[in-house]
Amino acid sequence: MKVLSVFGTRPEAIKMAPLLKKLEEIDAFKSVVCVTAQHRQMLDQVLRRFHIQPDYDLNLMRTGQTLPVITTHIVNGLTDIIGKEKPHIVLVHGDTTTSMVAALTAFYQRVPVGHVEAGLRSFHRYSPFPEEINRTLTSRLATLHFAPTETNRENLKREGITENVFVVGNTVIDALARMTRSGFTFRDKHLRALDFEQGRWILVTAHRRENIGEPLERICRAVRRIVSTYPDVQVVFPVHLNPAVREKIFASLEGCERILLMEPVEVEDMYSLIKRVHMVLTDSGGIQEEASALGTPVVILRSRTERPEAVEAGKAILAGSDEEKVFAEASYLLENEAAHARMSEPIPLYGDGMASDRIADILLSYAREKGLPYKKARP
Ligand code: UD1
Ligand code: UDP
């Protein structure tokens, strides 16, 4: 079975990596990888760590790129590759513009699409933007839906999508299992120099398009207030490479005492950071999942989330981007030890680390059903 996997950004690469490794292990698959490189440095950082060598690289990232430009470049670049490779199935992940457009391009050539991380919904078309609509469209285009949780399956059902929906867990937990080990020391020398035994550390990340501008300024003000109110608190903030994000964050926080702004860190360093800090403040999707698996409380810098499981389980708090609210929620966790302890128990909400195995099995069954070239998996 020839499987063409298409992805382009950091989180897609992290979450597709364990599945690509699984496909490589099984003789029945011919795995072909195409990266759009919607991200460049942040994608390459992940490809290196997981030893992934793409067969095709559309190399499309431009500084300050717009959604229409990414969209048209992906359609143009990928059409030829799908035409040449003639895969039995195209796999896409999640909700980026790469995912949605790759699914559309495959559909135009009548190639079935498998959607990894299907069924997440915030039920608001502009939050997150454009991800909510990207993933909804991808669901309409896909043939196989690999949903991380039962909630995700229910979301698809509400949209009338009930066939070929499989609850498999999130491959992010597979990636965590691959990339975390005891006795790990940071790869980054700046991180190695930090003393996590001294005081309390907070990890911050922010990059969502709907937070760029005034919301990001409010978030930064809240971070400054947290640090000035709690003298034992230190912040580590790996800054996304989007220039619009960097400009605001550096303008607001550069040079502030006890706030360390960093370049994007390697994924194992990130996992180790999440594990060691007192709490995480983030608008990231993937980090919400990782933090609940690693047992670190999260203050979500968004007004709604498509990952409600952690909020419902009391492991994450929705704070949005209001300065007062972000400050209040972080203060609550800094001052209330019992609440912090309750939120710090790791909980397997998003999977058990076997999602890639399940997806590979389902693909093999699909190949059998469709009479595609099929060989039994190596034991
Ligand atoms: C994209 C995804 C978002 C995902 C995020 C993960 C879309 C529309 N957005 O958002 O869903 O959560 O990735 O991080 O698909 N840049 C670099 N180097 C890099 C990466 C980005 O310089 O390695 C800069 C470039 O100037 C680029 C800009 O960041 O133009 C924005 O990148 P883009 O992929 O358009 O949007 P993100 O906000 O990263
Ligand atoms: N991540 C990383 N280095 C960083 C920041 C994030 O490796 O400096 C990882 C993080 O652990 C998670 C993924 O990147 O696995 C999340 O990416 P991002 O927040 O950019 O996107 P989202 O998940 O919101 O789509």
Image (cartoon, rainbow, N blue to C red):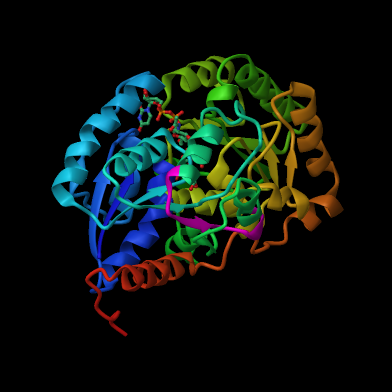
Q: Position of residue 259 (x, y in %)?
A: 59, 30
Residue at image point 56% right, 35% down: 132
Q: Quadrant of residue 77?
A: top left
Q: Quadrant of residue 126?
A: top right
Q: Position of residue 31 (x, y in %)?
A: 24, 60
Residue at image point 44% right, 40% down: 190
Left/right placement of residue 110 relative to residue 286 reads: left
> Is 182 covered by the magenta stretch?
no
Left/right placement of residue 18 relative to residue 202 reads: left
> Is 149 covered by the magenta stretch?
yes
Q: Is residue 60 visible?
A: no
| Range of residues picked out in magenta | 141-151
Q: Quadrant of the N terminus?
A: bottom left
**Quarter for ligand 1?**
top left
Q: Nearer the viewer, residue 177 or 122?
A: 122
Q: Is residue 74 visible?
A: yes
Instruction: Pick out the residue farthest to the bottom.
Output: 379
Left/right placement of residue 271 relative to residue 41 reads: right
Residue at image point 56% right, 51% down: 161
Q: Position of residue 284 (x, y in %)?
A: 56, 39
Q: Nearer the viewer, residue 186 or 274?
A: 274
